[in-house]
């Protein structure tokens, strides 16, 4: 008779589920394959084993096999289990969200609660609620900024964390990224948003003016992304969103030659980085904002803001949230087939052929 170690089998199943949540499929399958199922296996062990096996088949695209495993090995109950919900409501994401929200409070096992939470995050993505998807998936917002006061204030508003960060200090960048990974276990999303845009004409521009903008906007983005990619590569997963601009790549503006050059450079870097890291499950994309109502735009004065508003077809200035919604989408699992691309968010500003289109 085969000797059965119940504690070891439960431990293996839990380890398998844990590694699956970390996107480490080989380890997850290895631990699950070490479980020995026989007629002497306890019902709870049998249930967990076949549920995990069916789930792995489902996410591997083998949905018929997953359904067969459930039908042959899992007793039907009044409340649908996690995988039944995904199989039964594959074409009805709203009902899928409803069913998952219904079973989530009933989960007592920590690992299986995490699985339901993860499934619910995916379902939220399917119905387009990306903010809720990130929150449900347990995303923790971490602010890295050279402005300690504003950075901490923003982090508190988002129930997040703050790290003092000078993006052109390589050692500090590496330390902060390493610290985040050690504290939270992983770093899945990076939004690189550091940039300055002092206005000075080419004639009056000094070498120091040029170097300062390139260092912060280009070198800073490079150092932060480079440090982050090292950890994302180990995870075999990552989403990087780079905040560029319409200026430089699409448009120009007097006084921003150095700024435009830096933003165009970011896009060139982004495309090559996307190619190099696509095989590791990492996507790298950019957002090109138009005129967004940030502190920098407000400081430019009401006259400038009214001038910019007049050339935007939707006749309003953009809000920071407009960029945030786009970033949340690109950071989601649902955007996994998009990499090396740029999305313009400008209210249609670059569309008119003539300035008097209205």
Image: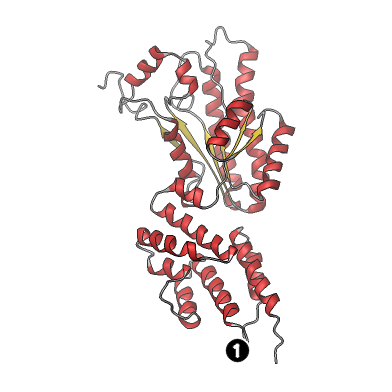
Name the residue located 70 percent from the left edge and 75 percent from the top edge.
8
Q: Is residue 101 left or right of residue 277?
A: left
Residue situated furthest bottom in the rendering: 1
Residue 126, by quadrant, is bottom left
Quarter of the figure with the N terminus: bottom right
Where is residue 47? Give x, y as percent.
55, 77
Above-or-below relation of 43 to 202: below
Confirm whether residue 137 shows in the render. Answer: yes
Residue situated furthest top in the rendering: 204
Residue 23, by quadrant, is bottom right
Q: Is residue 353 left or right of residue 332?
A: left
Residue 48, by quadrant, is bottom right
Label 1: few (<14), some (14–19) or many (≥20) C-alpha neighbours in 10 Å: few
- Disc 1 designates what residue? 39
Q: Using the image as rendered, state which of residue 277 and residue 99 is in the foreground.
A: 99
Where is residue 350? Give x, y as percent.
37, 27
Q: Using the image as rendered, state which of residue 358 and residue 183 is in the foreground.
A: 183
Residue situated furthest left in the rendering: 358
Above-or-below relation of 83 to 255: below
Confirm whether residue 192 shows in the render. Answer: no
Above-or-below relation of 334 to 246: below
Name the residue located 35 percent from the left edge and 30 percent from the top edge.
347
Q: Is residue 253 left or right of residue 272?
A: left
Quarter of the figure with the C terminus: top left
């Amino acid at each position: 008779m085969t000797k059965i170690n119940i504690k070891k089998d439960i431990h293996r199943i839990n380890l398998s589920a844990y590694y699956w949540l970390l996107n480490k499929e080989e380890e997850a399958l290895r631990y699950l394959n070490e479980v020995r199922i026989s007629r002497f296996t306890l019902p709870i062990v049998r249930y967990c084993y076949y549920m995990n096996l069916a789930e792995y088949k489902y996410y591997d695209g083998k949905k018929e096999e997953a359904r067969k495993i459930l039908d042959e090995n899992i007793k039907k109950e009044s409340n649908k289990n996690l995988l039944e919900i995904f199989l039964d409501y594959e074409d009805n994401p709203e009902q899928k969200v409803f069913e998952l929200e219904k079973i989530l409070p009933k989960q007592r096992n920590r690992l299986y609660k995490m699985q339901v939470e993860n499934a619910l995050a995916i379902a939220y993505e399917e119905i387009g609620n990306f903010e809720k998807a990130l929150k449900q998936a347990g995303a923790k917002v971490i602010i890295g900024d050279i402005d300690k006061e504003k950075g901490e204030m923003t982090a508190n508003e988002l129930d997040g964390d703050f790290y003092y960060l000078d993006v052109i200090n390589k050692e500090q960048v590496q330390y902060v990224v390493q610290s985040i990974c050690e504290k939270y276990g992983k770093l899945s999303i990076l939004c690189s948003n550091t940039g300055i845009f002092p206005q000075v004409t080419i004639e009056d521009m000094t070498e120091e003016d040029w170097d300062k903008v390139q260092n912060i906007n280009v070198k800073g983005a490079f150092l932060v992304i480079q440090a982050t990619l090292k950890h994302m590569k180990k995870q075999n997963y990552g989403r990087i969103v780079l905040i560029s601009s319409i200026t430089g790549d699409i448009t120009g503006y007097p006084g921003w030659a150095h700024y435009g050059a830096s933003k165009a450079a970011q896009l060139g870097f982004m495309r090559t980085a996307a190619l190099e890291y696509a095989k590791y499950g990492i996507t790298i994309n950019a957002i090109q904002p138009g005129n967004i109502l940030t502190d920098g735009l407000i400081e430019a004065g009401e006259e400038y803001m009214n001038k910019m508003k007049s050339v935007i077809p939707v006749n309003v200035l953009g809000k920071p949230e407009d960029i945030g919604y786009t970033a949340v989408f690109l950071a989601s699992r649902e955007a996994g087939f998009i990499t090396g691309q740029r999305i313009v968010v400008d209210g249609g500003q670059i569309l008119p052929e003539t300035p008097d289109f209205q």
